[in-house]
Image (cartoon, helix red, strand yellow):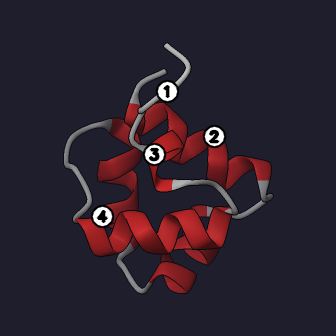
Amino acid sequence: MSTSTAYARAREQHDLSLEEASSLLGISVESLVAYECGEEQPDAVTVRHMALLYGQSADMLIGIDWDE
């Protein structure tokens, strides 16, 4: 799974709209859309905030699978 897909899937699993998630993450909707479409990569702080908000590890969000 690509990182952009993981970002969108995690948000959708928590039934958050783009507007709700971006507000809770402290970023613009445009930035979140860019991350979810793979146009840009979030910085480490944003990935950490996503992990906390979505209840997933940062490793999972950025596509690291330790079982491979």
Q: Given contact means CB atoms under 8 Å apart, are the residues at marks 2 and 1 in contact?
A: no
Amino acid type for the residue under numbered disc 3: Asp
Q: Which badge, 2 or 1, is on the more N-terminal residue?
A: 2
Q: Nearer the viewer, residue 44 or 68?
A: 68
- Direction from residue 46 to residue 11 in the image, left or right: right
Give the number of the disc on residue 9: 2
The residue mark sitting in front, 2 or 3, is: 3
Label 2: element kind:
helix
Amino acid type for the residue under numbered disc 4: Ser
Q: CA distance from mark 1 to mark 3?
A: 7 Å
Q: Which badge, 4 or 3, is on the more N-terminal residue?
A: 4
Residue at 49%, 21% (x, y): give it: 1
Above-or-below relation of 34 to 67: below
Amino acid type for the residue under numbered disc 1: Asp
Q: Given contact means CB atoms under 8 Å apart, are the residues at marks 1 and 3 in contact?
A: no
Q: Which badge, 2 or 4, is on the more N-terminal residue?
A: 2
Q: Which badge, 2 or 3, is on the more N-terminal residue?
A: 2
- Direction from residue 21 to residue 2 in the image, left or right: left
Q: CA distance from mark 2 to mark 4?
A: 16 Å
User: Which residue ends up furthest to the top in the rendered image?
Assistant: 68
Label 3: element kind:
helix
Residue behind mark 1: 65
Label 4: element kind:
helix
Give how far across and how far down residue 31 sits, in percent: 30, 64
Above-or-below relation of 30 to 40: below
Residue behind mark 4: 31
Q: CA distance from mark 1 to mark 4?
A: 25 Å
Give how far across and how far down residue 3 sits, in percent: 40, 35
Amino acid type for the residue under numbered disc 2: Arg
Q: Nearer the viewer, residue 43 or 28?
A: 43
Residue behind mark 3: 59
Q: Nearer the viewer, residue 30 or 59?
A: 59
